[in-house]
Each structure stands twice: as C-alpha cells, then as structure tokens.
Image (cartoon, rainbow, N blue to C red):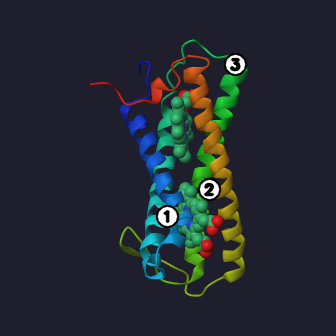
Amino acid sequence: MGNKYSSLQIGIHWLVFLLVIVAYCAMEFRGFFPRSDRPLINMIHVSSGIAILVLMVARLLIRLKYPAPPIVPKPKPMMTGLAHLGHLVIYLLFIALPLIGLVMMYNRGNSWMAFGLVMPHAAEGNFDLVDTLKSWHITLANLGYVVIALHAAAALMHHYFWKDNTLLRMMPRKR
Ligand code: HEM
Ligand code: HEM
C-alpha cells in the first residue's frame, strides 16, 4: 500500500459518485419528462440505486481488509476520529437507503424492472409498510445530500486549507 488508495478503491469511489448523481437526478428531474417516460426513469433510478448498494458493500469489505493510506501531514487524532465516524455514516446511509428502496419495491406487489430485468415482488401489496419505507427513503435521501455536502467540503478543506494529501490519495493515478 503506497500513499494512495488502491486503483480499485479509487475507481469504485468515483463510480459511486457518478451513480449517486444519476440516482438523485432521475428523481429530482422526473417531473420534466412526459409521464410515458416514467417507467424508464424509474428503472434508471432503481438500477443505479442497486448498483450503489452492491458497490458500497464491496468497498466496505475491501476497506475492512486494507487500511486507508496515511495522510501527510498527519491530522490531529480528533480529526481522524471524526473522519472515520463520517465515513461510517456514509457507508451505513448509502447501504440502508437503497436497501429500503428494494424492500419498498418488493412490497408494492406490482411488477417492476431493474437493469432491463423483471424483478421479484410480493404477491400482494403491503401499503402500510410501503408508506413507512417511503418516508424513510425520502428522509435518508435528504440526509444524503447533507452528508455528501459535508464530505465534499471536508475533502476541499483538507486540500486547500490544511494543504495535506487527503484528496490526492483519492484521485486517479497519473500515467
Ligand atoms: C443510494 C441510492 C438511492 C438514492 C440516493 C435514492 C434517492 C431517492 C430520492 C431523492 C427520491 C425522491 C424522494 C422524493 O419524492 O422526495 C427517491 C424516490 C424513490 N426511490 Fe430511491 N434512492 C436510491 C435507491 C433506490 C433503490 C435501490 C430503489 C428500489 C430498488 C429506490 C426506489 C425508489 C422509489 C420507488 C421512489 C419513489 C417513491 C415515490 O414517490 O413513490 N430507490 N429515491
Ligand atoms: C465531490 C464529491 C466527493 C469528493 C471530493 C470526495 C472525496 C473523498 C476523499 C478525498 C476521500 C478520502 C478521505 C480520507 O481518506 O480521509 C473520500 C473517502 C470516501 N468517500 Fe468521498 N468524495 C466525494 C463524494 C463521495 C460520494 C458521493 C460518496 C458516497 C456516497 C463518497 C463516499 C466516500 C467514502 C465511504 C469514503 C471513505 C473511504 C474509506 O473507507 O477510507 N464520497 N472521499
């Protein structure tokens, strides 16, 4: 392990970043499209969401096996603790959010698709459960905006204010 995250970790980090943009944009801008496009937009949303779920679990497992590369100059222990807590929150949030989405879709009891494939669903809808999960999904999605904004701001503070290598460790390697 050098002074950067591995290429795999860097690749997954920025791929998830793009997928998060796709998942949010699909929902935020769905009103701009005709109703006939709704099934496609929903499929884009759920497919990117499921991909995020799989990639977040994969990267968490990779991260548990390989420690993060050191930050130079070394931040205060309190800052390192806060960063670890923040990262844990991001992992949990972006695993729980798509999981809740999946359980919600299953319990709607209607046919739905992801990645062009028909997905399993319950024989009958459980509308009370779906309503509860929907409000959780929306709350966590809104929380996601705050958490990502704080995360990106922290990365920029490291780079421009504290002038350490935190951000460079997560940038693609130069050839
Ligand atoms: C990290 C991934 C995800 C993010 C960031 C995300 C975010 C969002 C956002 C912002 C909304 C709009 C909420 C509103 O109306 O204010 C939404 C709605 C929705 N999401 Fe997700 N979502 C994710 C994953 C998933 C997954 C994996 C599924 C299902 C497999 C899913 C299913 C839904 C559904 C069905 C709605 C519409 C609820 C409704 O208005 O009836 N989402 N999501
Ligand atoms: C403008 C957007 C972003 C920037 C500039 C950015 C930057 C960074 C940087 C510099 C690190 C390394 C931090 C460190 O090791 O202390 C990092 C780690 C991380 N980022 Fe991002 N990030 C962005 C968006 C996202 C998004 C959208 C997600 C997921 C939803 C995400 C999830 C994570 C996670 C989970 C880690 C921790 C990696 C580990 O376990 O060590 N980031 N990010």
- Residue 116 visible, this angle: yes
Using the image, tell me which numbered label, if any, was put on residue 26: 1
Q: Amino acid at mark 2?
A: Ala
Kind of residue indicated by mark 3: Pro
- Crowd tier of the residue under label 3, counting other residues whose Cα lies within 10 Å: few below 14, some 14–19, many 20 or above: few
Which disc number belongs to residue 77? 3
Camera-near label (1 vs 3) is: 1
Q: Residue furthest top?
A: 73
First in sequence, mark 1 or 3: give its number.
1
Question: 59 and 71: which one is in front?
Answer: 71
Quote the CA–CA distance across marks 1 and 2: 19 Å
Q: Secondary structure at mark 2?
A: helix
Q: Is residue 174 above or below residue 19?
A: above
Residue at the spot of label 2: 96
Q: What's the residue type where badge 1 is placed?
A: Ala
Residue at the image point whose x is 43% and y is 66% from the top: 44
In what quadrant of the picture does the N terminus appear? top left
Q: How many marks?
A: 3
Q: Determine whether the residue tagged by mark 1 lies in a helix, strand or loop.
A: helix
